[in-house]
Amino acid sequence: MNFKTVAVLTSGGDAPGMNAAVRSIVRLAITKGIRVLGVRRGYSGLINKDIFEMSIRTVSEIIERGGTILYTTRSPEFHTDKGVQKAIKNCRELNIDAVIVLGGEGSINGTKKLIENNINCICIPCTIDNDVACSENSIGFDTAVNTAMSMIDKIRDTAQAHDRCSVVEVMGKKCGNIALQTGIAVGATAILIPEYSFDFNRDIVEKIDFTQKMGKKHFIIIVAEGLKITSQITAKITEKTGIESRATILGYVQRGGSPTAADRVLASKMGCYAVELIENNIYNKVIAIKNNKIININISEALNYKSHFDIDTYKKALEISI
């Protein structure tokens, strides 16, 4: 076995299931005789040497916890040559043979700087936006959708009681995956996303009018946060339809909370796979899921994948939202 020491860090936005992935990495690595170092606060911890040795007990009772026990942050210093060189120096001083990075596309992109300096990396997609293009699913997405769904189910009760229209903003700055899946799950009247243009009168006003004639009195509109139109849309619906409309921004509740079973299982599988790659001297890979199978893709290749939004599912959602 060539690898003796690995470091694991969580970077960027936290995602439910990160802890489950860290747990599986630590436990499998240690059983295989591999030393594991935990890096606190992502790339900043690598720069500032905020690093500690992990043990089997370090990861006890964390599989059900949201957030990340390793903490996370975005590191402007890692975008500088000086910051990168400090991180490289620390990796070499600690004899780190590979760094396992848990995060989204930005975090994965950061590994290029390590690889260019001969530090091996393995990446695990962890992002509630599910926008790592090379993987069909990412850790945290299922939990975020289920959290949003649960919240909106509660909002619907009030909307129904008052014959209101509830406009609910879900997370997704550049990506409408959460909005799409949540919108389908809650039976939204309209789903507004960055990837697909909409016509206010056709897609909202006329649809509300049509369903009103069929006896429906309350409505749910889902908006992805990246559109930045939630307040305007809410006011405009009231103006054009006469229906009392209220806006709700779900915000960071979608990031937190206990991960679903699906996220715990996916995280555990990906964490174990990362250790198996390292054990077999395979590195500089992104772990992905495709056709329900866990695979690995070269990091350079993975970063060239183009995001693919499921337009077909979106169109089906529009057809059944009546």
Image (spheres, rainbow, N blue to C red):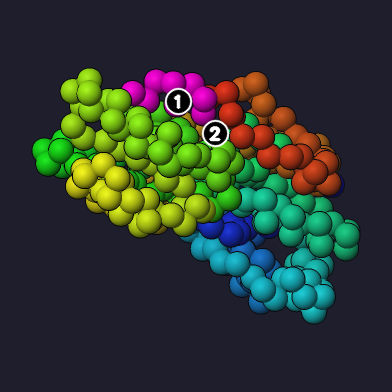
At which x and y percent is residue 308?
Answer: 66, 34
Q: Where is 68 relative to 123, above or below?
A: below
Task: Name the side, left or right, on which 115 lies relative to 274.
Answer: right
How many neighbours does mark 1 have within 10 angstroms: few (below 14), some (14-19), or many (20 or more)? Answer: many
Could you tell which of marks 2 and 1 lies nearer the N-terminus? 2
Q: Which secondary structure lies at badge 2?
A: helix
Mark 2 lies on residue:
266
Rendered image quadrant of residue 217? top left
Instruction: Inspect the image, locate mark 2, and give the three-letter code of the amino acid beneath it.
Output: Leu
Q: Where is 41 relative to 319, above or below?
A: below
Instruction: Inspect the image, locate mark 1, and give the three-letter code of the amino acid beneath it.
Output: Ala
Mark 1 lies on residue:
317
Q: Main secondary structure of the magenta part?
A: helix
Q: Which mark is residue 144?
A: none
* Residue in the foreground of this view, choosing between 138 and 88: 138
At which x and y percent is residue 268?
Answer: 55, 37
Rendered image quadrant of residue 84? bottom right
Residue at the spot x=72%, y=30% of the render? 295
Where does the C terminus fall, quadrant-wise?
A: top left
Task: Name the side, left or right, on which 281 lies relative to 223.
Answer: right
Task: Name the side, left or right, on which 71 lies relative to 241.
Answer: right
At which x and y percent is residue 19?
Answer: 49, 49
Rendered image quadrant of residue 211? top left
* Residue in the foreground of this view, choosing between 139 and 321: 321
Residue at the spot x=44%, y=21% of the render? 319
How far apart marks 2 and 1 lie (CA) works out to 26 Å
* Residue in the foreground of this view, choosing between 266 and 104: 104
Q: Find the magenta span and give its range.
A: 314-322
Q: Which secondary structure lies at badge 1?
A: helix
At which x and y percent is residue 303?
Answer: 77, 46
Task: Name the side, left or right, on which 25 lies relative to 91.
Answer: left
